Amino acid sequence: MADKVLTANRLSDGTSVWLDAAGNWNERLQAAFVARHKEAVEALEATGRQAFADNQVVDVNVIDVEEVDGVLRPLRMRERIRAEGPTIAYAIGYSGLAATAA
Amino acid sequence: MYRYDEFDHAFVSGRVEQFRDQVARRLSGELAEDAFKPLRLMNGVYLQLHAYMLRVAVPYGTLNSRQMRMLAHIARKYDRGYGHFTTRQNIQYNWPKLSELPDALADLATVEMHSLQTSGNCIRNVTADHFAGAAADEVADPRPYAEILRQWSSVHPEFSFLPRKFKIAVTGAERDRAAIQVHDIGLHLKKNGHGEIGFAVYVGGGQGRTPLVAKKIRDFLPEADLLTYTTAIMRVYNLYGRRDNKFKARIKILVHEMGAEELARQVEAEFAELRGSELTLPESDIAAIATYFAPPRLAPRAEGWANLAQWKKADPEFARWVQQNVQPHKHPDYGMVTISLKPIGGIPGDASDAQMEAVADIAQEYAFDEIRVSHEQNLILPHVALADLEPVYRGLVAAGLATANAGLITDIIACPGLDYCALANARSIPVAQEISNRFGSPERQAEIGELKIKISGCINACGHHHVGHIGLLGVEKKGEELYQITLGGSGDENTSIGEIIGRGFEPEKVTDAVEVVVDTYLGLRRDPSETFLAAYRRVGPQPFKDALYGEKTVAAA
């Protein structure tokens, strides 16, 4: 069985998040709790269902990952891009609202 | 352009407040996701890979500078400083927060913009020729009819829950720049033998997983019957369109399965029932809407001819830009300017807030305050005096918007692909960027001539790959990206669906494959005036297959 983590998008802003070992939704894949056996995966799925029902997150999924040299890497490219952001330099010159608000 | 009346203002503002309430109830947990999702989609809000996405309608691609500035403001305040102009003449923002979207929509409403009907199984934003009202070859401006369709279809109760989404495009010229034959309904404005205005009506075109070219079901529909006949089509579709299978629910499948003749018969029968009803458009109503689209008063500016000749002589880059990005206007002293959103190696269709502001400034000063979005993901200034082309060009250069590549190989359409889109199987943008870099030299582009590359990251075909002269479709195979090449597609008045040329290519090989296709074309064309598409139609796929896969290849499945 491939290692698995629980991922979703936060309801309020849509940001991609992963469930960490403390039961919080973390914006970093590397902080994710990794399930390595069936019972742990079932616990992830149950947590995901509850978080969805509690309106914390949407689009909840358990995804396959592998750990290479201590770094988590999703098996599907889709999930790698979700974790790392677009693979392109998409907002050249953008430095956040604070810099442009004045 | 069209101006909202009191009804329009109240209607759009009312919808914003409804959505504000819906978002508040969703965030408080009062509304569950299943109940909320259709509501957010009705307001153009999707959930993508990294965030929500807001799609804002630009009706028939027409904007003024105030509206463009508002799009820049939305990019700055609610997003990450940029937006993405789409093949539906809309704009998408990739990073808005759900909690802030009602404020964004309220801001948009102040300039008569909204995101209604940019999603859902309804009649979507009606698109039109981006040169409408300016093109020398135009019979009539298609936008008044697009606006009439917009008003009629907005939250139309009978057509808000169709079997599937429904797209209408209108063109007013023989040269089809609105790709009407790959729309659910395509309307071609024309004059009959008596000089009366009407439409040739095409039905059942579309791309996606089943690409089909629309069938003409009526050669001439009087303009007064536009809504009556469209209603008849919608009713036949609503009645017989499949609801059991999402992939077979578009009207193109109905046309295909029922046959165009039978569909036309049914539509005509419904039309006969409806004709003469309140749906008939009074001439005065058409005239009233048309006045909103009256062309600006274009004073003679004959001095531009001499100026232009001097400027071109003095600056070869300016001359190249004029050659490629300025088209003849119906007034001889004016031109139609394409502002390329395809910088070499850039992201097709993206514009920063500063660039949007720059375009607004230039439009206000030199282009009668008119801007268009083209379905090819560029911006257009439809009315610019030749005498003003030089300062317009300088302004565009300063904003990084003066790439001289309209219609050339680097003027690539690309969907957001797997970098953003939850539906995508493969990335589109990096592929477009690499091809753009490979072919970026002006000399090489000029040698190749007109060549449209279109890239989609999944079979839904938002990147219009089926009608690309060279189309690229990204698929996922064994967890990796693979790009299938189609050749010979076209989205103009001679629409054709591209043919799959053979097995796909890995990301690192696809640019080489495109280069092989291009070099093959250069080697076999009769002379430089024979375009890629013309050459392909003459010789067929085999020379390209041989070049890509070796001699005596058998077409791949």
Image: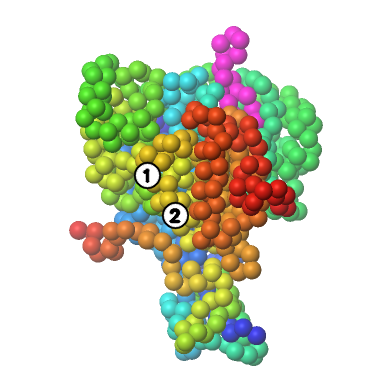
Residue B245 position, x and y percent, is 74, 54
Residue B64 position, x and y percent, is 34, 36
Q: Is residue B235 left or right of residue B467?
A: right
Examine the image and state in which quarter residue B181 appears: top right
Mark 1 and mark 2 residues within 8 Å of each other at the beta carbon:
no
Identify residue for label 2.
B434
Residue B142's label in the rendered image is none
Does the magenta portion include B363? no
Residue A83 position, x and y percent, is 47, 73
Q: Is residue B419 left or right of residue B388?
A: right
Residue B80 position, x and y percent, is 35, 60
Q: Three-letter amino acid code at disc 2?
A: Glu
**Region in magenta:** B184-202
> Between marks 1 and 2, how big is the CA–CA gap?
13 Å
Identify residue for label 1.
B441
Q: Nearer the viewer, mark 1 or mark 2?
A: 1
Structural crowding at the residue carrying mark 2, measured as other residues with C-alpha within 10 Å and reported as few (<14), some (14–19) or many (≥20): many
Q: Three-letter amino acid code at disc 1?
A: Ser
Please tell me which residue is depicted at 65% across the width and 37% down the height of the picture: B540
Nearer-N-terminus badge (1/2): 2
For the residue labelled by badge 2, is the local secondary structure a helix, a strand or a loop?
A: helix
Please tell me which residue is depicted at 39% across the width and 27% down the height of the picture: B327
Quadrant containing the N terminus of chain B in the rendered view: top left
